[in-house]
Image: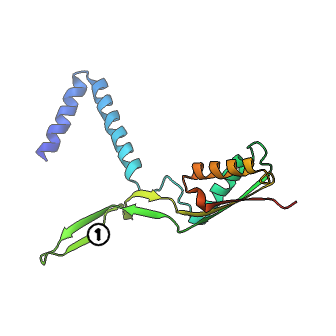
Amino acid sequence: MSEQQTVAGKIRAKLNSGKLLEIIAVIALIAAVVMIVLMNFSGENKTVNASGEDYAASLETRLASVLSQMRGAGNVYVFITIDSEGEKVIATENTVNADGSVTETPVLSGGEVIVLEEKNPEITGVLIVAEGADDLNVRFNLLEATASVLDIDQSIVKVYAKAK
């Protein structure tokens, strides 16, 4: 109780001494720190966690849009296959038991597991169908651009001409 009275007494003394601006600045700083902490550690997710299929569909749309802009490509259709739903790397804590065994438990914050990293699903194949793929230069450019943009091996990219 005496400690609270001392703090309250110090605040009253500051108010009486004309240092109101100093007090307001300290309160604003404390409020800013509290807001930052609450925003960073709240249970809300700020990112959208898409499923693997949503991820692939988004890539297909974006890639088809870009590839169709290449000289000679014409309309381009893209189909992407993926291996998994991706992977989440979570924070864990290791505890050494009395018998020497190690127990690994997830670290929680606000009842939620802390995710350190989210890895995208692995792309296992890309099929491209383009109007201009009859031309070998166009076909090669589509293949090379796709492998480069997706950071995948060219051997899993197949490019075919669209039926007329």
Residue 162, given in percent of the width and then of the height, sits at 81, 59
Q: Residues within 10 Å of mark 1 (few under 14, many from 20)?
A: few
Residue 111, given in percent of the width and then of the height, sits at 37, 65
Q: Amino acid at mark 1?
A: Thr
Task: Work out whether residue 55 can be spotted.
Answer: no
Residue pictured at 68% horizontal, 50% vertical: 140
* Image vertical order of residue 146 relative to residue 35, above or below: below
Q: Secondary structure at mark 1?
A: strand
Residue 155, given in percent of the width and then of the height, sits at 59, 60
* Residue that protrudes farthest toward the front in the picture: 136
* Residue that protrudes farthest toward the right in the picture: 164
Residue pictured at 55% horizontal, 57% vertical: 153
* Quadrant containing the C terminus in the rendered view: bottom right
- For this view, does 78 lie left or right of residue 25? right
Residue identified by numbered label 1:
105
- For this view, does 108 lie left or right of residue 137? left
Residue pictured at 71% horizontal, 52% vertical: 64
Residue pictured at 52% horizontal, 62% vertical: 121
- For this view, does 36 lie left or right of residue 58? left
